[in-house]
Image (spheres, rainbow, N blue to C red):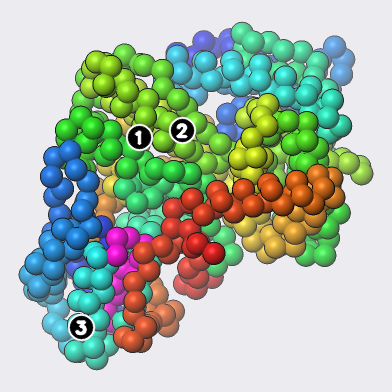
Amino acid sequence: MKSIVIGVESTAHTFSASVVSSDGEILSNPKSVYKAPPGGGIHPFEASQNHLAAAPSVLSEALRSSGAGLSDLSAVAYAMGPGLGPCLRVGAVAARTLAASIGVPLVPVNHAVGHIELGCLLTGAKDPVVLLVSGGHTMIIAYSGLRWRILGESLDLTLGQLLDQFGRHHGLASPCGRAIEESASRSNNYLRLPYSVKGNDVSFSGLLTTSKSLLDAGASFEDVAYSLQETSFSMVAEVTERALAFTGKKEVMIVGGVAANKRLSQMMSAMAERHAAKVLAVPLEYSGDCGAQIAWTGVLAHGSGIEVPVAESTVRQSWRLDVVDIPWRG
Amino acid sequence: MTSPGEAEGVPGRLLYRGAEADVVLGDWQGLPAVFKVRKPLAYRLASLDQEIRRQRTVHEAEMICHAKRAGVTTPFLYHLDLQASTMVMEYIGGEMLRDLASHMAEKEVEGPFFKFGEGVARLHAAGMMHGDLTTANVVSREESLVFLDFGLAHRTSRLEDYAVDLRLIKETLVGAHPGISRAALDAFFRGYEAKAGTPRFRRVHSQLRNIERRGRYARVA
């Protein structure tokens, strides 16, 4: 029988709730996004205030536009982590309250697993090498032996942080990805920047420092943005290619906020072509943080009997995806 | 961006399409030989791409020689063509540790992974890191392990770099061989310790823990 799950996402700048059915239909996915001031990053407390204010309306909108009533819900899923503590707690309180008041199980979901599982649902990916690129993650991931395994990752900054911190240095407001992409598209003057691939891992900190210094020394924002994109995306494409060659898999799926960047997906396509692999891109609306990733993974987890008693439904700011069992793929 | 003659010039059988190079089994002066061709990567900007390929080809040749002097088994180098970013070297045959490991029982890992650890300790003692120590880059031939692909190798005396090598091995074992990873890693570390000595091993190992703690969302143990 078809069941219906509501999922609550609140790990960082986005508060979102979504109603998803067990056959994979996304019935609603409203969100409220905290905007950081220009030149600044996410202030966790201020973001949590945004979420607190937005929670009631986002939750009721998620239910109203889905056409489902409270009595139709068979579980409430929430992003238990990883993320910013104050933000996570808002989602956890909302989910806990809802689950306890209507008497359905509470299902904890790992936010990163959520990105991947929603991506698989929407792209039809069966057994992909996943590139998860966002403000919180830069990881190359593949499924093996009951878990999503990390084959490579950033040793310091994430790709999203690299772009945001570079953009903010120039006075832009986070998230800066789109503005950087647009500026970069106006240049083809490549300035040499540090290219740092260490095994299957990448390191962006030297790249950020050099890029900022170039700006300070008077280089044009367009040129540095272009060079920064070319260098960092090449590094990410190289380690993804290594994972693809190593595992011999035939699908590459890009998820996370930075997946929206066209130059990145263009590079990934050219890379995958060499290995006769397919590139699967998650539709823009669902590649960034959203409730649907939590609700759909909640459907899968609930189906495998995963739930948490309200008394133990804490949040986990540091919760790596490779410690999460994935019984529904077993 | 791609000059057609550059990549297409090697006759032979494609053994392996790696992330950055094609490995072709061909003929060199009547000997079976492996041609490692770093082809232009279309997704990378041409100037950046060319520099990376040239640099890695020169580097790799130097590093192979250095590793050999350190007592680590590597292929013999026959010829270097920098124009085409191509290395010609001895054909090894044998079986990749990755493929061996995929059908190993937990008690069979001791021998090969202990040797693997010894070899890596030798490299580090000679002042270099391999930079790409996945199980696809180590081949078992008769009784010995042959180390391949020194494209990301460096001369270094930093503890951090040695620990980065160990980190990739750990990442590969846990990521790609979860069934035997614990036993394999254990044998690897013991091999490393046997060759490097306990104090040295402990220093590198504790640096590995430091790196892991720096990772995103790592649980601080």
Between tags 1 and 3, which lies in front? 3
Q: Chain of mark 2?
A: A
Give residue A161's quadrant in the image: top left
Q: Earlier in the sequence, mark 1 or mark 3?
A: 3
The span picked out in magenta is A75-85
| Location of the C terminus of chain B (image quadrant) | bottom right
Pointer 3: what residue?
A97
**Relative to B80, residue B157 above or below:** below
**Residue at numbered disc 1:** A264
Residue lying at 49% horizontally and 19% vertically, measured from the top left: B49
Write down the chain letter for disc 1.
A
What's under tag 3, amino acid-wise? Thr
The residue that mark 2 highlights is A235
Q: Nearer the viewer, residue B197 or A289?
A: B197
Q: Earlier in the sequence, mark 1 or mark 2?
A: 2
Q: Earlier in the sequence, mark 2 or mark 3?
A: 3
**Number of numbered labels in the structure image:** 3
* Same subunit: marks 2 and 3: yes
